[in-house]
Image (tube, rainbow, N blue to C red):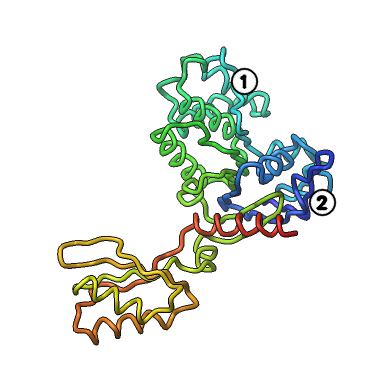
Amino acid sequence: MIEVERLEKTYGFARALRGISFSVQNGEVLGFLGPNGAGKSTTMKILTGYLLPTGGRASVDGLDVVERSLEVRRRIGYLPESTPLYADMRVDDYLRFCAEIRGVPRSRRKAQVARAVERCRLERVTGKNIVELSKGYKQRVGLAQAIVHEPPVLILDEPTSGLDPNQIVEVRKLIAELGEQHTVILSTHYLQEVEKSCTRVVIVHQGEIVADGTQQQLVAQQPSGGVLLTVRGPEQAVLSQLRELLPADVPVAVTARDGDRVHYRVAVDRQNAPVDEALARLVVKNGWDLLELRREAATLEDVFRNLTLRAQQEAVGA
């Protein structure tokens, strides 16, 4: 549905995009993730026809975004970071206006506005002026204008920016529902947004793609945070034996105490796989009760931090 090939964008001497390439399949919900200034919004604006690329190309549904810009826009619902609303209009009037300029036939306009209102749960506020609405409802109106013409593609740029925690949960749930019927690119720097809503993740940093895959694939490539161990036994003796067993540069720490159970964290990574068996043998040999031994799972946050910090360090070194 979306193809991006070696896309570049330069502002003077600043390179916002450095030849990025990725694709989005029909029905996929792609999380376009990156820190502020990574090039996310620039990519979204090129895909939606607001900016021209300096190099490379992009297409939506097989249509080049530069050569066939108007046809591409008809296939896209776009929610930019600053929600495009006319504050002095009523919600229902605004959505009818959006349907009209989007080319929805008069005979279908009323039904499609009603459908957008229902999907975005705006029934309670359709008769109000937009200026009267909370930030959460304004964001819903922004989503409603993006889907009122029933586009196959939705491009959402920081859709929960500035919302309170309750509003974020509501909008996030709505985005997940929209993902069932549209191809979606969700641009954000909020990790939870991606974890809750997206089937695939692209991480961009300083105008370059540093990762592309499902959450499970990206997490599996990261070293785990260590081994978590729960033992019923004398704490000082356990610590002493653990430190004797492990290399001096491997930290061991007590993370919690629960009655006679003590929880330990051994900071080793995946490359130290044999240490799991050695830890188990040590506990059993000393006659202590081994209640838990498991690898600490890596998270999408670990992936994001490792990749963006590594890319930043490499750029500084270069």
Q: Image point 53% across, 46% down: which residue?
A: 181
Q: Nearer the viewer, mark 1 or mark 2?
A: 2
The CA span between labels 1 and 2 is: 35 Å
Name the kind of residue labelled 2 in the image: Gly
Neighbours of disc 2 within 10 Å: few (<14), some (14-19), many (20+): some
User: Which quadrant of the structure image shows residue 213?
Assistant: bottom right
Indicate the secondary structure of the residue bearing disc 2.
strand
Left or right: residue 71 compared with residue 155? right
Left or right: residue 255 compared with residue 90? left
In-front residue for pair 20/115: 20
Residue 208, given in percent of the width and then of the height, sits at 71, 54
Indicate the secondary structure of the residue bearing disc 1.
helix
Residue holding disc 2: 56
Q: Image point 61% across, 55% down: which residue?
A: 308
**Vertical order, 74 against 113 (above or below):** below
User: Residue 196: which disc?
Assistant: none
Q: Image point 34% across, 66% down: which residue?
A: 253
Residue 318, given in percent of the width and then of the height, sits at 75, 59
